[in-house]
Amino acid sequence: MDAASQERRVRISRIAGRYLVFDIDDVVYIRRHHGICAVLTGTMPQNPTQNLFLSLPVELQADEARLLVDKGVGYIADELAEHMAQLTAADDSARKAYLQHLKQQRRHAQQVLDEERAKAQAMHLEKRKAAAASKAKALPPTSSSSEPSSSSSTTSTLEPEDSLFDPSPAPAAAAAPRPKQTPLPGITPTTSTALLPSATASSTPAVADTPAPSPPSYPLYRYLNARGYYTTPGLRFGGDFSVYPGDPFRYHAHYLANSYGWHDEIPLLDLVTSGRLGTAVKKSFLFGAAVEGASEPGGGGAGVGGGDGKAGVRVFCVEWAGM
Amino acid sequence: MASLDHLAALTKVVLNNLEYQHDWTAVQTYTASNLTRPLVYGLPPKRLYVHPDEQIAIIKAEKALGERIPQEPELEWVLPLHLSEKWSPAQFAAVFDAIEAIPPGGADKVPFDAQGNGAEWKLWRGPKRGKRILLATVQDDSTITYYWIHDGLVKPRQN
């Protein structure tokens, strides 16, 4: 498993500007080995839910997608371009195979329909037998001529049902050969899976790698990730990220984090409100920025944020002083 | 210079507030060539900040000693600000770079004799102390709110 995880390249599907991972093994791998939990987004299109019980795919934030690409453990696939490229590249044999596949699907549909019809007929046949039996039971005691009205009323209640299915039992025996003459039912394919080459081929990008995004919060994100922190989207605490000291399943968040530019002017009210909110939920408000011109003399400081390789990041934590 | 007047007034408001409302002592201003405005430092009446790891060290030491360790207040930095101001990360970094972790005169007072045995908590008053500043944000009605700002990743206190 470890050997496999070393060669693993996570396929990040870029669809409509979102970064999605569809493979459950990839999801487990990036969470366990790269501190990325991202957000499960899968739900039923017909009955969307907003709760925690969501499924694949996992949606990565742009920062997370970028990190995976930078670490060389993932690549971004532009799914639309790739899809179109594969569709247009399909040759004659692929076309034939697809038509064959469609036919197979229609046969399958016919089979299912036949089975269902047979089942329904068997059910109604049974019902009719039961009804006839109960009628036969009910008839013998009422032999007088004054009774027919009641007996006819019982039959009349059964009548509509009988009449509905009456024609069916007679041709039932003859119905079996009929489907062979009728054309197979038409189907509308809901996915284009069958149009594409086999799924195994899609493990390598057919189209050249899509460039990774570079969101402004990426330096701060990478700084936190490099220190073992997990992040989730920070909306619930009013920031860019909620920052956890380990997997969010095990820990409460330590910080709510915002990313700024090195010379971005932050209104002090923002610091006060975020600091207050953070303290109210037992967190610290963290803000950070990538140091501009980190190599210039005098800008080094105590090297608090600088230990991250290329881009130095300076972070500050704000909390209520209690006075 | 109007802006200098403003800064002087702001510093004075904070200084008075610390001294007369919060009972700080030895409150002084601190100016330096690499600071764009004067800072304030002083001694609060009781300990204002205990790092969560320091707290653990203190509890361990108290357990070993079998008695409570009195927590003397420490000298703290204060940065006077007005609510209408906007500060960039670069400016905060410049302030942190211009100061030592312990305000002037603070290092001498500390009974710093961390000789291994159970005195690890004392390190937090000396070499282990990170840079922290109280942001004193003044509003026009002279309300002042105090918030800690720490240099670097400092985990929140368990309050």
Image (cartoon, coloured by chain):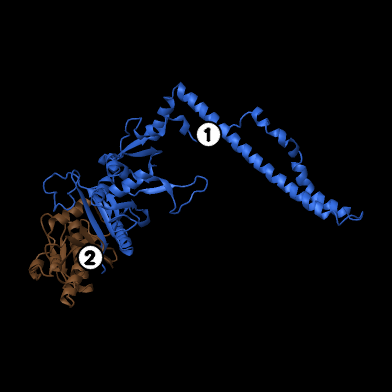
Q: Chain of mark 1?
A: A
Identify the residue at horizontal 40%, vertical 48% (top origin).
A40
Residue receiving disc 2: B52
| Label 2 secondary element | helix
For the residues labelled 1 and 2, say whether their Cβ atoms are less than 8 Å apart. Answer: no
Residue receiving disc 1: A189
Identify the residue at horizontal 34%, vertical 53% (top origin).
A234
Viewed as shown, does residue A10 lie left or right of A290?
right
Name the tint of chain A in the rendering.
blue
Name the tint of chain B in the rendering.
brown
Identify the residue at horizontal 83%, vertical 52% (top origin).
A153
Location of residue A27 in the rendering, given as x and y in whole percent from the top left corner: 35, 46
Position above or below: A175 against B52: above
Location of residue A197 in the rendering, given as x and y in whole percent from the top left corner: 42, 29
Viewed as shown, does residue B23 lie left or right of A51?
left
Q: Which of the 4 image quarters holds residue A285?
A: bottom left
Q: Kindly report which numbered mark, 1 or 2, lies closer to the viewer in this rendering.
A: 1
- Image quarter hosting the N terminus of chain B: bottom left
Going by the numbered disc 1, the residue's amino acid type is Pro
